[in-house]
Amino acid sequence: ATEFEELDLLERIFLRLGNAETDQQLEETVGKFLLPVLVKLESQYKPVQDKVFELLTHVSKQLKNRPQILLPVNDLLVCYQRINASPQLTNFSLVYIKLGFPRLSTSQQVELLPVLMQSLEGKPKHQQDSVLQTLTPALVHLTLPKSEPERLKLFSLADKPTIRATVLDFFLCYLLLPYSPVAVPPGLSNDQVCRVTGTSYPPADLLEKVKYGILKLLSAGIFSDQEVICHLLVTSGDSRHSVAELGEHHLRLTGGSVDWNSPKLVSQLYSLYLGSPVPAGNAVASSTMQQATPTQNHSPASLAVRVKIMLHLLKSTHATNSFPSCIQAVFDGLFGSNSNAKLHSLCLQFIHAICSKAKEQKLAVMASLLLTALTKVAEEPTESTHLRQLAYTGIGLLSRRAPSLFNKDLKIVAKLFESLEKETVVELSLVIQDCLNMLSGAYRGLQDSGAVVMEALLLEKIASASYYVRWAAARYASVVFPFSHTLSRFVCIVAVGDSKEDVKEEGRKGLKYPREEEDKMEGTSSPPPTFPSIVHYFYQKCLQRVQSGITYTTAAGSLPLPPASMGAALKFLQLCLHFSAGVAGVGVAGVGTQQTLQLVARYLKESEDLTLFQYVEILKQSLGSAGGMELHAVAMEYLREVVITSPPNVSNELGKDIYWIKSFIHSPSPDVREMAAQLLGTITASHGRELSLLQAKGILQDTFSEVYHVRHGAILALGHVTANLLQFCVDIECLDVVRKALERLVQLIVKESPHQLSLAACVSIGQICRCGPLSLPDASSQTDVLSKKLLVQILSDKLSTSVDIKLKEQCALTLGYMAVGDPLHPYKQDILFTLFQTKEEKAFDLLVTVGEAISCVAAGSLSTASHDQWKLVCSVEQSPVDGSIMKWTLNTLLTQFCTSPAGQIRQAACVWVMCIIKHAGRHQELQNHLPVIQDVLIGMLGEPNELTQEVASRSISIVYDLSSEYERQNMLKALFDTLMNGKKPTNVSGDTELFQKGALGKTPDGSHITTYKELCSLASDLNQPDLVYKFMHLANHHALWNSKKGAAFGFSSIVSNARTQLAPYLPHLIPRLFRYKYDPNTHVQLAMVSIWNALSADTKMVDKYIDSILKDLLANLNSHDWQSRQASCLALCDLLSIASTRDVATSLAQLWELCLRARDDIKETVRNAADKACKSLDSITVRALDCSVSDQSNGSKVVEEVLPLLLTRGMSSPSADIKTISLATIVKISKNAGSLLKPHVASLVTSILEMLSSVELQALNTLSLQLSGEREAQSKLDDIRIATTKTSVLMDVVDMCIPLVDDGVVEQLVPRLSELLKSGTGLATKVASAQLVITLVHNCSSNLGTSAGKLLSALISGLSDRSTGVRKAYARAIGHLVKLVKPSSITKLHEKLKSWYLDGEDVDIKATVALVYREMTSHSLDGVKRAEVEIIPLIFLGMHGQSEDPAFEGVNGLWEEAWNDLVIGKESALRLYASELVGVSCSALESPSWPVKAQGARAIATIAETMGPNLESAYIDTLMTALLVALPGRVWEGKEAVVSAQRMVCVCCQNTIRSCQDLQKLATEKICHELIQQCKKKPTTYQQCCIEATGDILDALKADCYMDFKEILLPIIKNGVDDTLGMMADLSDTSCTLKLRAVVFRALGKAWPQCTDTQVACTGEVFALMGNTLLTSPWQTQVAILCGLRDLLQRLSVSLSEAVLSYVNITLIPILSQCLGVTKYGVCRATLMVLSKLFAILKDPQYRFQESPPLQDLRQALSTVRDPQDKELVVEILKHLQ
């Protein structure tokens, strides 16, 4: 157009706008011309553009103050989104969009929200902000769809990341808005405030609502949790409760799925927390900061939001490594103005997180700053206790990660010690103490000046008044310095004497020598201080304390340190002495062994005298009177050792204090007395005969003291001192003293002194006897002369009569020692008989002691008893010994005692044999008996008594060690033949049988000897049979071996030797031992545990041999032996608890298979063990899938092998337990496997679906069968079963698999799923399969593709299932699936469903078809609309179904829902699809099925009723004809519908019918005639329907068939029944009869013709009939008669004859007058209407109606009418009567 034309157009528009007088006119004009005017902005003519600007200015002014005027926002949006629009056009379009959008209704605004959101794409930022400002308030009214796919589709932002980012940023700014304008809004810049608010700040209430709406949108799943987490954090800290509560709720829901280590998220959080400018560590942020203006810099968020942010920064590792942001956040939170106590606490916790999670390089930079902050908070006394606690804890954590920051400066630790000393708050003291504890590691290994300062600090603080400080000092002493550091050990010694137990314990730890294993664990290895250095240092410290007066003082005296410290010091000095001397097992081995004494003696011989004398002086100080009995016992023990091992000068020096030492034999402590007696004997022996003789005499006198402990000590000392006399030259004086001493000691025993004195006397006699022959006669006739025989008798009597076990033991030992000191003792045989009498004793210790005594008698000086453990040389000179005693002893034990029928005697004999071979192993006679001894001992292995077995076992191993190589081979063969092959042992002699035939290998419970069989088997498998002896040593486990006596036979040295000897066989031995540890036989188990503990000193043993162990377990899990299966299962549990996933990944499938098989074992114990193994397998299988602890390759292999196994073997097992285990594991694998599950999705899903029915409760299936005949109950039960299935954990697994479905998975899954839908068994399986189809449609619609048709076919086949629940589920699945199939498939589906519906008789099928269509229209409306022409007619027909069957209940509702979903308006749909609807309805009428016929008729009735006059004549003809064809014939159930439909067509379409001659003819000649004929047919209900329909049709069409119709009706009225038509039987029911009569009377009125001839002929008869029956009928019939009479009078067109008038005046009016008095309002009202019509006719002058009595009565009756509604009729009647 030209410039002139465009300007002219604009002028005309201007004129139209100016002429608009009302708002409506202006709205219409603006709506019509605004968009064309805006388009003119793109005109090429400048005047045109200017004119447009002028016009738009005018429009804007007009609209400004007229908010009710609406703008064409839709059109403006279209214009705004034009791709090539000019900037002016888009700007002005946006202006009017912003102006018009708020004027729209809320529903219109919500409808346009998606359009506005889409319009953001490609627009400048300021325009985007304007659009967002416009749409944001409308979010208040937004109602989001319930379906997630629909919500995602609503705004379609999934593939528009730029728009998403813009929207989210805008929303975040909006959510940060405060509820009232402030100068510096928290979290926002001024520019951002302007961005989101525009020109006006929203009111507080509106702002709250908008925030709430934004929050609902953000949490609806449209945006990812990662994108909206900042928004949720901001809203959770909002000041309005509704917003904060909703934000907090969604924050809890989404917080777990957020990646808090995302750099982008962490940057956003720091930006909100700190505000801008952003820290320079972020390059992007830095560039932004350089360009930012003051109005663009935003302030930190509000305090509540900052608290929330810091709370979640604690979860982020990346946040702790974001330097310098993390430091700024900490300092701002701790020392900034915008903070509170909560934020202070969180910032300190954040420092803890930095110390724990930050990388080394980052922490090195931040450490000093963090320490500054922590120190400032910790040292601030005004801070709360809680914050200071956190600060101190932070210092400790920081010291662990940055020790170099602390170990260079000891001021920090000094300050902490000072703070701890001054602190009065207990809680804070504990925290500072913990802080110091954590700092201790940073100072480990201090050198030079630092060590000196620390030493001084510890010496000072260990004496602090504060218990916490002393504990810390002790801790530092034990940790900071190495074990070889003397000063720190002294600090620990001081700590042991503390009054607080914690300090004591810490001091003990510092003095405990670290074992080799502990060194390895801690990465340190430090020896104790050298003996000279620690002795010298401790001696000097003690001297200083004494000189300075800092001592432990009591009334009895003083000590340099408290007794506990002195005792600890002595023990530590002794430990250092042993270590320096080279004693093995320092800290473990006991004191006083022969080897230890020799090593110590060698060391002390080379040591300086000063060191030794200082050590002795320390011991003497400890023996001071202030020490106490416990300290005295320790000091005396170590002094005794020193005297024994030191050079003679020490003993000589102590000899000067002999009386001081002697005083200790009178100590109140029994232990001190005993050790003092030994020490006194040793010292006197070293000083020669004179001193010994002198002391012996003095001590002998003390034995008569009245003081108990003096006498007891003297008795003990007498034995040691007197025994020394036998080592010197034997003179008369010495022998006399010895004799007197013996007599005194025997006297104490004989006189029944207190048992402790008797015991001491017995000990002393034994000590004297062991040192040499007694100077006593062999026998004496005088009873008062002590002889050897008498002494033996006395001790024997005491042994047999005493009840004190210890005294009995000592008597036995003393008897044995007689033969040691005197090899030619004449009463050895008597001693042995005495000792043998104890064979029935049950005390194990006594048996062992007696055995030792027997070995002394049998071996004499060759016995180990000849060696005094407290002397470095043998105390008895060894001489050749006669072997006859040993031979006799062994024969007695082996042939008599070992074969005794008494088990206790056999046990005693076994113990004694063990003692003999232990203590006299090198005796030649014993060597000759070793094979026989082994045979006897092997037999003992089958003893019922467990202890006897173990004693025999240990004895066999000792025998083996004593044998020669040749003998070992023979013994080994005999042992294996006996244990493994069941051969009997060799006889002891030719005619002596040790065991009865078959007794060997059988025990009372049949299991005990298994232990040794297993040991032999173990040795054989290693191809080293001789190892069986080693195993028998190690396998003993009885508790008695831990006793003092039993430990003597423990052979602890064999453990270390065994490890070395068995090392080459460990790869084969360890797997067997590991399994045997769990053997069901308790004896085998305990034996193997003992061997394992002996061999597995290395804690890594299992890790080292894990492959071999696993291989052995795999082999034995399937063993034929149940014990092996059970042991393997239990061993597997233990192995899996420590094994890594890599170790077992390749064997998991095989382990699962074997363990599941064992879970169904025939033996219950095996099943229980297998259950534990399966649980362990479950755990490690899940761990193998965790990428953080296992390689992905391992996880993939596990899924590939284990999952199919569980699905096939596990879930198909008949065992319910195996199914349960497999199911639980499958669920866990599915939850943890992630993408590893993808290749197995198809098989997993289908298997799980099949399982659902098998895991369903059997009771439900049984109940379902029982309720099969009760439809309602069955349906409810199915609903319960379906609900249970949907909530099953198995369905959770299926849901987990859905995200993994892609094209490849679909290709595998669909065929299996289709087959399952067709042939699956069980309701649960079928329903779940259908539910899976729905899930696939929603989540994987793009992947299904052509597969949807296959699924549809499978689902159709299941619609005929007998279960209602299955049919519903399949219908629902079809409803969802239809949207993906081809239109042709929908058509085929419809044809099939249509044939089922129309041709079938099954009500359930019909209900299912209805459900399918309802689901299709509900969920796949677009798909259905592609075939709506075919579908709508059937739905319409279905809406008209009826049935009394309970299954049909609600079906019509389903059809109606489908109809409402598919069509917008009923009438328009009927008009649009009239042809199809008429066709389907007529087809239904032709159906042979009566219900379908009736349904078609009802459909026709609806068509006619809805469309009425709008229905075309052709369709009317078709419908009438079809109905006419259906009328003849018998009466069938539901035929009333055909009659009703014919009536509806004729009545509703009467105008069309009357206007068409053919239709009129059809209706009057054929239809009416046929209907009149149908009126004759029974039953009554049908006849009633026909009469009523005929009357309505005749009334509507004005047809004259009254004569024929009357002929049918009058007999019914007159007689109540027409006998000629045979209707008596059908009218027997009174109610039906009354209804029929009422209908007849109504029909007579409705059918009254317009033909005058007919009226003349029938008026009188009908009047009389109605009038005569009126009063005699019930009120319901009366109403019908009156209505019929009213209709007749209304249509009456002829003059009434005289006869009729007479009837009316004389009869009818009185009758009507009486009807006015009827109480039923309906009768009264109908009567008034009849009277009104009647008198309207009679007022005609031709009738000359005269006043008469009936009329007077009528007036009187009318006056009684009181109802206000009837007054008008009464007035009208009275007017006619005037």
Image (cartoon, rainbow, N blue to C red):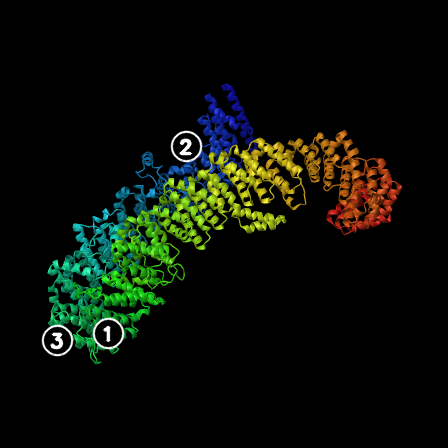
- The amino acid pointed to by label 1 is Val
- Name the secondary structure under disc 3: helix
Please state if 1317 lies on the left or on the right of 748 as rendered.
Answer: right
Q: Is residue 619 above or below residue 713?
A: above
For marks 3 and 1 on the same chain, the one whose residue lies earlier in the sequence? 3
Q: Is residue 1423 above or below residue 1289?
A: above
User: Is mark 3 in CB contact (under 8 Å) with mark 1?
Assistant: no
* Residue 560 appears in view: no
Residue 136 percent location from the top left of the image:
46, 38
Residue 1657 percent location from the top left of the image:
86, 38
For marks 1 and 2 on the same chain, the one whose residue lies earlier in the sequence? 2
Instruction: Read off the residue under disc 1.
Output: 792
Classify 10 Å Cα crowding around label 3: few (below 14), some (14-19), many (20 and above). few
Callout in the foreground (1, 2): 1
- Name the secondary structure under disc 2: helix
Q: What is the C-alpha distance between the residues marked 3 and 1?
A: 24 Å
Q: What is the C-alpha distance between the residues marked 1 and 2?
A: 119 Å
Return the residue found at the far front: 990
Classify 10 Å Cα crowding around label 1: few (below 14), some (14-19), many (20 and above). many
- The amino acid pointed to by label 2 is Lys
Q: What is the C-alpha distance between the residues marked 2 and 3?
A: 128 Å
Callout in the foreground (2, 3): 3
Foreground: 350 or 1186? 1186
- Determine which of the numbered discs, if any, sits on residue 732 in the image: 3
Residue 960 lies in what quarter of the image? bottom left
Classify 10 Å Cα crowding around label 2: few (below 14), some (14-19), many (20 and above). few
Residue 189 percent location from the top left of the image:
37, 39
Instruction: Read off the residue under disc 2.
Output: 125
For marks 2 and 3 on the same chain, the one whose residue lies earlier in the sequence? 2
